[in-house]
Image (tube, helix red, strand yellow):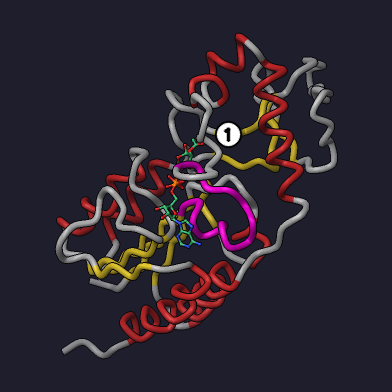
């Protein structure tokens, strides 16, 4: 089977750029109920609070830069593409740091930079309207309140068909900076492991879904991922026995 690497990233990969993760001390969900900010019900019940939460996160994007882990993954993608080998980056992250580093990322949980109209489904890429108190009207149909194009709890992630296709071809898999709490993404590691893929995991502490057979590399992504990308390139290009 042709070698294909699938990389799944989570909030930990952007932590070294200064963006908060979700779980744990200082995480975005600490002291907050996800039901109050990250569900369609919350948006319907209190759009001003939900909007304020996401406007602060959208504004934070304008203050951060991709780090060494984002750059290493972008360089790995280029090298694997040049070598004619399969590569797919799937991210749960709603920030744009992979994109800014030059990767082609499938944003399965949506993107902070995009706004979506619930009436006409129009989308706009906008990181200029950052006033936490001012909603953004849809230029297409005039609806006064576009929502962040984020996949909230209870909604279906984006790109599941593409993801399924990539996972079914995957011979090498790396889960980087994700706690393995949120499905379906948390299930990818076990699925590819069961199909015989070689698996690598990086995060600060062992994630929920780590199992025997995974190569676990604890530590900060900026310290671990650049060297891991070198190892993955070697693995992918090593002559078959
Ligand atoms: P979490 O906050 O659940 O987990 C972050 C992971 O990153 C943990 O395993 C940490 O150990 C690890 N980590 C923290 N700092 C790190 C660093 N500097 N280097 C490497 N790893 C580090 O974030 P996710 O797993 O991404 O969904 O969360 C998954 C989803 O849950 C998110 O996409 C979001 C959230 O609710 C939605 O908003 C829909």
Residue at (56, 71) in percent of width and height = 74
Which quarter shows the C terminus?
bottom left
State the image coordinates of residue 127 (x, y, percent, origin top left).
79, 43
State the image coordinates of residue 119 (x, y, percent, origin top left).
67, 16
49 lies left or right of 161: right
Q: Quadrant of residue 193?
A: bottom left
All told, the count of numbered labels is 1
| Up-down relation of residue 19 to residue 219 (above or below) | above
Q: Quadrant of residue 6?
A: bottom left
Q: Check disc 1: other Cα within 10 Å, few if <14, some if 14-19, many if 20+.
A: many
| Up-down relation of residue 171 to residue 24 (above or below) | below
| Up-down relation of residue 11 to residue 27 (above or below) | below
State the image coordinates of residue 234 (x, y, percent, origin top left).
36, 86
Name the residue nearer the viewer: 151 or 224: 224
Name the residue nearer the viewer: 147 or 29: 29
Q: Which residues are magenta?
A: 10-23
State the image coordinates of residue 90 (x, y, percent, origin top left).
45, 54
Which quarter shows the N terminus?
bottom left
Name the residue nearer the viewer: 92 or 52: 52
Q: Which residue is mark 1?
A: 150
Find out whether residue 12 is within the magenta segment.
yes
SS at mark 1 in the image: strand
């Amino acid at each position: 089977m042709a070698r294909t690497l699938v990389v799944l990233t989570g909030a930990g990969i952007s932590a070294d750029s200064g963006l908060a993760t979700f779980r744990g001390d200082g995480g975005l969900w600490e002291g907050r109920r996800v039901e109050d900010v990250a569900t369609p019900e919350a948006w319907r019940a209190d759009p001003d609070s939900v909007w304020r939460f996401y406007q602060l996160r959208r504004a934070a994007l304008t203050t951060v830069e991709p780090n060494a882990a984002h750059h290493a993954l972008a360089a790995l993608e280029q090298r694997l593409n040049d070598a004619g080998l399969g590569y797919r980056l799937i991210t749960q992250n709603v920030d744009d740091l992979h994109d800014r580093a030059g990767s082609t990322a499938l944003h399965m949980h949506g993107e902070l930079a995009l706004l979506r109209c619930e009436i006409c489904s129009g989308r706009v890429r906008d990181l200029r309207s950052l006033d936490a108190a001012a909603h953004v009207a849809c230029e297409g149909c005039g609806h006064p309140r576009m929502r962040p194009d984020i996949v909230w709890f209870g909604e279906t992630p984006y790109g599941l068909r593409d993801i399924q296709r990539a996972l079914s071809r995957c011979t090498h898999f790396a889960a980087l900076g994700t706690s393995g709490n949120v499905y379906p993404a948390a299930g990818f590691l076990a699925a590819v492991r069961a199909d015989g893929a070689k698996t690598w995991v990086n995060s600060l502490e062992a994630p929920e879904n780590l199992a025997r057979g995974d190569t676990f590399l604890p530590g900060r992504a900026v310290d671990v991922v650049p060297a891991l990308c070198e190892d993955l390139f070697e693995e992918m290009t090593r002559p078959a026995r």
